[in-house]
Image (cartoon, rainbow, N blue to C red):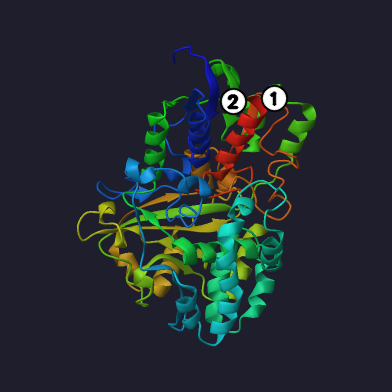
Amino acid sequence: MQKTDFDAIIVGSGPNGLAAGITLQQAGLSVLIVEGKSTIGGGMRSAELTLPGYVHDVCSAVHPMALLSPFFKSMPLKEFGLEFVQPTYAAAHPFDDGSVAVLQQNVEETAVGLGADASAYRDFMAPLVADIPALLPFLLGPFKFPEHPFLLSKFGLKALPSAVWTARRFQTKEARGLWAGMAAHAIQPLQNVATSAFGIMLMAAAHVNGWPIPKGGSQMIANALTDYFRSLGGQITTDFYVDNLDKLPPAKVVLMDVTPRQLVKIAGNKLTSAYRSQLESYRYGMGVFKVDWALDGPIPFTSKECKCAGTVHLGNTLEEIVRYEKGISVGKHSDKPFVLVAQQSLFDNSRAPEGKHTAWAYCHVPHGSQQDMTAAIEGQVERYAPGFKDLIREKHTMNTSEMEAYNPNYIGGDINGGIQDVFQLYSRPVLSVSPYRTSAKDIYLCSSSTPPGGGVHGMCGYHAARQVLKDLF
């Protein structure tokens, strides 16, 4: 690499690294992004993991927060080739008796589908959907005094309880199961305080902007962000793995799109002992086990609604999902996991050869688990789609170690950059006036280990860059 001075260097090209780079470059700074892999994107990469012509999303697939993110909404990404497609239904949740609950893009239609719980769902979600747009700057950023304290207090009353507690609002298995599947995206026991917030945000996102799928793969989001960054004059270098900051060319500031464990490893000698100690106590959460399939046809779900959904949650009742997620948190596996399935090729024919399909699925596993969950995941799909296994042409799996090898930020298979429970929601990675600053004045953290946490929204990187501009430029 040419020895060139930069105003800022960003280590890592995930959504937050790219967001930070764009924000700083827009401000007129000279910015370099370095990426250890041969392709940019972090959790947004896509690849032919199984057979030629079958495009699989390596990590993120469906993007509920993409159209909700204030940062993404401010970007001219459509001009750089990014196109989203909307599934007929955001999500579907089948049950063993053949019934199904459907998350639609309209509160009323979703409510009507929940039968006796129609009024309960309408009363719960309609006010939230109305308030969420005004609350997004607070909800998707570091803790600060809110501009709309009354709206926030209303939100908090519904978001702070555990998902299990909130489920008491509903009587039917359909509403309770649909709710449990949404809240389980928290990747922690549903008895935990504030797990309702995850279910609320995902349902609200569906009702505001849907759960979009990027045409051509999640890599297209990364490509659009990269092209826009370069159009502003930013520079990117790939195949440049940073295990020591001394490898970098001179810069006024370095922003690290890494988790606390990596920050200590890479830059520990530049940090105070007190700050290092806080980072070392940072907690990581459950891992994931993922499977991608190349299929001879679409998944043959018994439910017609599941055949029209971008995402399908397989876990049957609330009670089953609660029991499974609690077991995972204490190191137990099950042959009937809660499985999240994405069916991108149903709505994007660029993902597979004509007449063929792809499918993407994962389940939660104990942190660092090495257990092969392929049979268990396929068993859950077959449970609601008899004949599914006969359609499999090829498969690709990733356990927690392979997830971490793919992206070093996924410590122990944790795709959220650390558990997002109530104790680590706004104190990521440490309790601080500014979580993006470190104890070194020229090193900042911009990863999902800072507020607002995991997800393809770019807001961690955006806020970190804004802090850098305020502090140093």
Q: Residue furthest top?
A: 3
Q: Quadrant of residue 169?
A: bottom right
The amino acid at mark 1 is: Lys
Q: Count of labels shown? A: 2
Q: Is residue 232 left or right of residue 434?
A: left
Residue found 25% across the figure and 56% down from its top: 349
Residue 209 x, y percent position in the rendering: 45, 61
Q: Nearer the viewer, residue 398 or 455?
A: 455
Within the image, what quadrant is residue 380 found in? bottom left
Q: Is residue 84 left or right of residue 323?
A: left
The amino acid sitting under disc 2 is Val
Left or right, 371 with respect to 230, comes to right
Residue 191 location in percent, x, y? 69, 66
The Cα–Cα distance between marks 1 and 2, rounded to whole angstroms, is 10 Å
Residue highlighted by disc 2: 254
Which residue matches tag 1? 441
Q: Earlier in the sequence, mark 1 or mark 2?
A: 2
Q: Secondary structure at mark 2?
A: strand
Residue at image point 42% right, 51% down: 397
Evaluate if marks 1 and 2 touch, with contact meaning CB atoms under 8 Å apart: no
